[in-house]
Every structure is written in structure tokens, then in C-alpha cells.
Amino acid sequence: MFKNFWCRIPEFWSILLSIFDAPSSGNPITSLFLKLKLLKSRIKAKRWDSSNHIADMCRNLTCLQRECQAKLDLDPLNGNLCADFKKLSSDLAFYQSTWASWTIQRAKVKWLQKGEEDLKFLYSKIRKRQSFNSKALKGVYHSPWKTTQSNASPFWKSLSITACNVRHSFSFHIHHNCRAYIQWDHWCKGATLASWLPNLILGGEQNSRLCDWINPLGWNIPPSVPAALSAFIRAIPISQLDGVNILWKYSNKAVFRDFYQEFFANDADFILHDLIWHKNHSLRFSAYSWLACMGGLKTAVEMIKRNIHITDSSCNFCYVHVETSAHLLFECDYSFMVLSSIIPSFANFFLRPNLGQALQHIGNLDIQKDIKNGMLLALNASVYHLWIERNRRRFNNDATSSCTLIRKIKRALSFRISNWKNDLTGGYYDAGDNIKFGFPMAFTATLLSWSVIDFGHTMTPNHLSDAITAIRWATDYLLKATSIPNTLYVQVGNAFRDHSCWERPEDMDTPRTVYKVDASNPGSDVAGETSAALAAAAIVFRLRDPDYSDRLLQRAVRVFDFADRYRGAYSSSLHNVVCPCYCDFSGYKDELLWGAAWLHKATRRREYREYIKRNEEVLGASDTKHEFGWDNKHAGVNVLISKEVLMGKDDYLRSFKENADDFICSLLPGVSSHPEIQYSPGGLLFKTGGSNMQHVTSLSFLLLAYSNYLSHANSHVPCGASSASPAELRMAAKRQVDYILGDNPMGISYMVGYGNRYPQHIHHRASSLPSLEAHPGRIGCRAGGAYYLSPKPNPNLLIGAVVGGPTNISDIFPDARPIFQQSEPTTYINAPLVGLLAYFSAHPYD
């Protein structure tokens, strides 16, 4: 018989090829027969022709391997012994595999020879076992609520115990197909029959099911059932509706989570689980921390507990104390110095903790979630690297200094944190597209907060609540965008790809690329504005939600430090991304002053006042002081700081009031001589560029805010030879608001939904495309073009949105989607208008 293990022996192939390479002569069949006969004789002459040879080789190689292993234990660094051991192991693996191949072949041959006889015996055994199991299982495995018998499997016993613990939460739906057991299940008004009738004996009926006792007409109880029991059962109603047999707390839609929570409701929470395992942590870091907590690290003490002999049980860091997990990771001076360098707060411990105490300490800290997760990651990473360093010293005789190990851990943490997937959900789109631009969004949040700070008292409770909710929606996003120190995420989405599509947000499939500024690619302008937004919002929430306010203020301070330390314009770092949409044409210096001014207002810290005064000229407080908007903050800085001067709190900053006075005078009709500020024939304040209403609402807001500051100080604005009273400033602001709401030559309200006539074709995707209710199918990128060019009015009214307004100084407004400079609403047009409308609705005759 051909043995398949011959194919594994190289010499077999040499013999085979030498025989069949020889030329053939005569009849081909005869030639083949002769060659096979020669092959057989050649193989029989070899010692490997029999399977006994394989068994002998396996035994011999095993003995040699054991001898080599013994020598290696005495001299583990001997290179020759290691090479010999590797060679022996390889040969042994080869022969063991060959023996397995031969065994399988021999089993197949025997099956072919005697398979029929084996099958008869096998099938008889199977039938006998099935018969036995059928009888045994019927007596043991009926219901999990039945008293567990001694011959039940451990699994069934565990299942029965668990079922009894949560039995009160299960109920039965009795219908024609109900398969509950008569005797064992608690189908009878929430209890078993034995509970109602303790002396009940059913005999053979105890394993019957309810469906056996029910027919279409009702109960069909066997005559053998006692009359009292039969009467009791017939009084129980039967549902005519089929469905689930068993219910969890009377619900047929329960999920496993419901059972899990019920079963473990009284067990104490194992908080270390949540502290160690986290989706943003490295799996290897968490795994080693978990092993350390569970006693799974193979330290010297743990090895001794398992009766494993080791030659040296001392710590590989200090070589003095016995190596335990607690000592190795925390009590040893080397380890604790590393941990204290990674997590400085550990240096304040009076007594050195173990890993569980350290995790609980971090878990109990009252700090924001992302910082806490970072500390937990740092602890887990330190445990992992300390263990790797221990192994390197014990097995490779290679030691690393604490400074080198600290640098290695910090590099690992930096890499891991930089690869965390940031949650950037929330926030606002800037206008009618589907892009989140961080710069105008932060400005929107700042102006909304300023509106609530100065004019919140004039709002109705519902309107004030809506305004605060809108602020929080923005600041929640800004907190996410600034969660990593010295990093700020400034844009979500590719503007060029998005602007080439006209599709609903629900159908959006353009790239949601995320862009950021950091120490290498600074963005002091957007970071300064973000700091201002967070600081202003902190004032809004100071009394309403103190914890949230503190969190906003701490983040504002951190973001401002980043903006000031790493100076540069974000339109330089991300020019191809943010330009031309939101290039910062005025530079970043005004945002640094703006952020410092809001931090000074929110914290009252002297350092920010000194920063403002020290950098007044350096950062150009008087430059372009007639501008205010998402790009240029100079006028806003001057007005905001002027309040301190007018209230007599900070005469130190009087130069800012002088700048503010000059700015306010330039806005007043008949007084202004500034070339960039004009008024249309209809009275609209007009500045060159697109979306003029952003200038109208922002500058009008400053007029109103400054008039209030003047009124409280009983002062006025000096404008050359004349002066302007607070009432004149309010009237100038009110004139602009009236123009927006319809008091203009066109007779049109530029706020959608207000008045009898307002823009019908605004440049806004969600407003111009049909809703999901009207058009459930997807509208693709190019398919939306038909709606973009349609002359029909927008199907969805964007109530309250204010568009860009007239195209030029002639008061003309083309109500057309393609002319986005005039027909597109933006958040930063509406934000300052909130304060204006709040004041004038409460003071209509001012």
C-alpha cells in the first residue's frame, strides 16, 4: 500500500524521479509495471519505508529535546545550545506531523475494510442513547422553575437558580398555544398550582402543557384532574389572541438588557471596569491595568503562589523588596517617580496608593470628562510601560533610565491622544450651506451672549430661555472643538465640494473633512474669538449653571493662552481651506484684544487689564476702529472696554473710550465723515462688500449698547463741536431695525416670515428643497440644481432669518437664490439683532 507520509521525505522524490526519468521500451503498460516494481524494491531497501521508523524518530527526538532543554536551563545564553534546541524542535514537529498523516491514512483504510460492521454497532449505540436521553430529559428538563433534580446538568441547575431569582418579573399569556407547564410554571394568577393547592397531586398530568388542556371552546381538563382543581382552573380566563407565551414585566418586547439590569440591580457597581476600559484607550494599556487589578500579572509573588520556582523574587527596579504588583507599580521609588512625572497630582499622596486606589482617585476628581479620560489613559499607559521595562530588565538584562521611560510614555500618550476621534456633533452652519465654520460660529455665540448680558432683562421668560438654549448649543460644540490642549478644530466639511452641491442636510454626502489649528499651524484669530465666546457665555451661565460657567471660563483661559502663545492668522495656516469664505483680512491682533477684554469682564483679573493696556498699541486698538463683524473686532473692543471707563471702574483705559466715541460719531447720519460708512436714500447704513445686513445689525447693536452705557453714566458722546445724546444713538439704531422689518422704499421685510412681504427665494438649501415628508426619496448633489434655479418660492419658510439685503446703496433688492450676497441668511446677521429686538420690543417708543 502506498503510504502518504512518503511524500514528506525528500529521498522518496529522488528515487521516484530517477526511475521514471529512465527511457521506456516495449509495451507502455508493461514498462509502467516494471517501473513500479522497481520503485517498490528501492523503497523497501530504505529504513523509512515503515511507519515504525517515524515512531522511533519521534521518541528519539523527544529524548534529545529534553536533554537539550536541561542544558539550556543551566546555560540559557549559550548560542549553540539555542540553535540545537531550535533544530531538534523543528525536526520533531516534522515527524509528529508525518505520524499524524500516516494515522489518518490508516484509519481511512480500516474504515473501508470494516466500515459496515462498525456502522451497525455505532447506530445501535446511537439509538440506545437517544432512547435513554428522551426518557431522562423528559423527567429532568421541563421548566426552569421546577425543583432541580440531582441528575440535571450544572448548566440547567444554574439556569434554574437564575430563573427563580427573577421569577417575579415573568408572567404568562394564556392562549390556545400557550406551552407553559401545568405543574411547574407560575401561570395561575402569578403563582403555581402548588401555591394555591399545597396538597395537590397530579401524577402523570404534572408534565402536561396548558395547550393540551385548552381547545377552541375553552378549557378541556382531563377527567383524572380533581374536581376542586378543575373548577379553580376553569375560572381563569383564556385570551383569544395568540402571541408570546411568556412576558417580561407584562411586555412582549423586552430585550436582554432589561433582564440583565433586573438581575444585577442589587449588586454593587464595579467602577474599575469603566475606569480601565474605554473606547479611546489603547487596548494593550487597558489589558495590562486590568491584569494588575485582577492579580494576573506574573510577578514573583504570583509565580510562587502557583508553585512555580523562581531564582530571584526581588523587584527588578530597586532589587530590595519582594516583587508584588503593588510594589512594582507604585511603592517602588523608580515606579512612583515615573508616575508622578506623568500625573503630577500623584506626588501629593501622603501614602502611596495601589492601582485600584489610584483609579478611584482619578474617577472621583471633579474635572471635565475629557481631562479625566486623559489621566486614566496616562495611568494605564504607565502601568503597561513599567511592566515592559520590568520584563526587559528581568529577561534581557537591559535597563532604561526613568527619564527615558518617561519620554517614551509621553510620546505614546501624545500619539494616542492625537488619534482620538473627536466628537464634533452640534454647533451651527454659518448660512445656507452645510459647513461648520468655527470663526463666524464663535462670533455668533459671543454676540448672542452679549445680547443676553445687556438686554436679557428686557426679554420675556420664554424668549430668554430660547436665547440661552441657543448659546449653549454653540458653546457645547466649542467645548468639543477645544477639548485637546493647544488644538482647535475650526471647520467641519470641505467648502468647495459642498458649494458645488445643492442638497438637503439629510442627504448630505460631501466629505466631512475636519480642519484644525495647533502649535505648528497657529490660528490666533479664531482662537481669540473662541476664547471670547466661551468667556461671554460663562457670564451668561454664572448664576444659571455655576458648574458649566466655571468649565467655560477655564476653557476660555486655556484657549486664550494658546492663541497668545502661538501667534499667527489661521488664514495663513489653512489658506486653501478657509479662503475665500472666511479669510481673516484684518489679521489676528484684534481678536487677541477682544478675547482679553471678555476674559477681563468675566474674571476681573488684573492680568487681563494689564494685557489690554500693554498691548493697546502693539495690537492696534485704534486701527480700523470703525469696523465690527466676524472679521474685525476693533470697534467692539473699544465699546466693551468703554463701559468700565464710563462706570468709573477703569479710567486707566480711557483711550479706548476715546476710540469708541470716535467710532460712534462716525455712524450718526449728518455727523459721519468716514468714507466707508454711507447711508442709502432710504436710510440704510451701507458698507461696501457682500451681505450688507451683517454690518447693519452689528453696528446698530454697538450703537444701542453704547447708548445704554452712556445713560447709566449720565453722559453723552462728544462729536467735534457738537455732541450726541444716548437717545440719538438709540434712534439711529432703531431706524436700522425698522428698515430691516419693512420700513424701507421697497416695502419689504428682510426677516423671513415677518410682515406681509418678505424674501421668498432665499439662498438656503434646507429652505429651498422639499422636506423629507414632502419628498422622502434622496435628492442627490446635482439633482438639487433644479430647485436652486427654480423660480418658485421656497417650500420651507425659515422663520426669523434675515437675509443679506439690498445689493447697493440704491435700496434695490433682487429676491433671487443665485445672488447669494443679498439673499443668503447668516447666523452672524441674526445674533446681534436678538439684543436689538429684545430692547425695542420692551421700549417701543424710545
Image (tube, grey):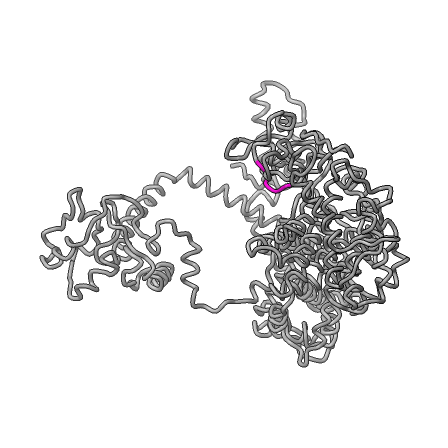
Task: Determine the residue positioned at 87% across, 44% down.
Answer: 673
Farthest residue to the top: give it: 26
Q: Which of 576 and 33 is in front in this view?
A: 576
Image location (x, y in percent) of residue 45: 61, 41
**Residue reaching furthest right?**
617
Give the magenta range. 797-801
Decide if residue 539 is in sight here. yes
- Answer left or right for 178 relative to 532: left
Q: Is residue 681 magenta?
A: no
Residue 69 visible to an observer of this rendering: no
Query: Which residue shows up at 32% across the image and 54% down it?
Result: 250
Left/right placement of residue 521 relative to residue 770 reads right
Q: In this view, does 400 lie above or below 572?
A: below
x, y percent for residue 796: 57, 35
Instruction: Tally the numbered discs.
Output: 0
The residue nearer to you, when weighing 238 against 134, is 238
Q: Tell me which corner region of the image, top left, top right, bottom left or bottom right, holds residue 410.
A: bottom right
Q: Position of residue 9 (x, y in %)?
A: 63, 41
117 on left or right of 567:
left
User: Which residue is drawn at the image coordinates 63% and 57% (left, top)?
Assistant: 456
Give the dominant element type of the magenta stretch: helix, strand or loop: loop
186, 48: nearer the viewer: 186
| Percent position of residue 322, x then y | 66, 78
